[in-house]
Image: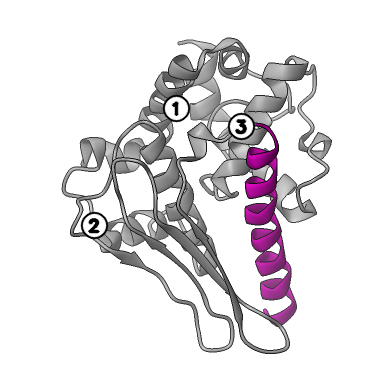
Amino acid sequence: MDETMSTLKTMKPIAPAYAPFPSLDRYIDYVVQNGVPEIVDTNVLTELGESVRAHLLTGLRYLGMVAADRRPTELLRRFAQATEYERKMLYQEVLINSYAFILDEFPELRGLTHDILVSKFESLGIQGSTVKKCISFFLELSRQVGWQMEKNEKLQRTGNREQVSKWTVTPTARHEGEIKTISLKSAGSLTLALNVNLLELRGEDRTFVFSLIDQLQDYEDKTQKATG
């Protein structure tokens, strides 16, 4: 058994990854540019909110990129050396290994529905808004490798009346059409609509878009803790 599979079987935290997916992509970009550290510290991504960095570290462990002692696994080293195409293939490997509880029954998402996804994650003991975040991460990771929900499957998830938060996912061949809406503390709501293939973003555009996503997620997390 190789190191990656051993990590997945013995070091996996309780909850699957639920940080915003762009934060994972950004950390991989970081190790590509700066090398794989001896001890993984997501705090190097200072532009991310504190809660996002914490969720990212948990996600890296779940996906088999980081061991329980925060040392990088061979999988993270492979990501650091991968070309863009190889990164896509590694994401597929991560999907198959980390989400077997879904993909063994619904390979490449065929026949998968939103209700089934909710049931799958809830069966792991995950509840509330964390289920929605786990689903959002899983679907975005799937889109990176070209796997999508059937086109007639619209996913719309709305929180309670006090704290409204929803993702609406409209699958297309170019990974477009994501909308994030959060409630503001004083009044009203704020919506971010994306019409872009995240893999095509470069330089300042990538940094700007990902920072907006991370700020929304961090604001939502803090608001939910305050009202919870």
* Label pair 2/1, CB-CB below 8 angstroms: no
* Label pair 3/2, CB-CB below 8 angstroms: no
Residue 121's quadrant in the figure? Answer: bottom left
Q: Is residue 216 magenta?
A: yes
Regarding mark 3 in the picture, which secondary structure is present there?
loop
Q: Is residue 142 magenta?
A: no
| Of residues 219 and 53, the one drawn nearer to the viewer in this rendering | 219
* Residue type of the residue flagged with mark 3: Arg
Query: Of the residues tagged 3 and 2, which is closer to the observer?
Result: 3
Query: Of the residues tagged 3 and 1, which is closer to the observer?
Result: 3
Mark positioned earlier in the residue sequence (3 or 1): 1
Q: Position of residue 76 (x, y in %)?
A: 61, 19
Residue on which the image places disc 2: 113
Estimate the spatial distance between the alpha carbons at disc 2 and disc 1, rounded to whole Å: 21 Å
Estimate the spatial distance between the alpha carbons at disc 3 and disc 2, rounded to whole Å: 33 Å
Q: Position of residue 73 (x, y in %)?
A: 63, 18
Say above or below: 94 vs 153. Answer: above
Magenta stretch: dominant SS?
helix
Say above or below: 48 vs 7. Answer: below
Q: Which residues are magenta?
A: 203-228
* Residue type of the residue flagged with mark 1: Tyr
| Of residues 17 and 7, the one drawn nearer to the viewer in this rendering | 17
Residue on which the image places disc 3: 202
Tell me the quadrant of the picture where the C terminus can be found: bottom right
* Residue type of the residue flagged with mark 2: Thr
Residue at 55% over, 27% down:
64
Tell me the quadrant of the picture where the N terminus can be found: top left
Regarding mark 2 in the picture, which secondary structure is present there?
loop
Mark positioned earlier in the residue sequence (3 or 2): 2
Crowding at mark 3 (Cα within 10 Å: few <14, some 14-19, many 20+): few
Residue 91 circle label: 1
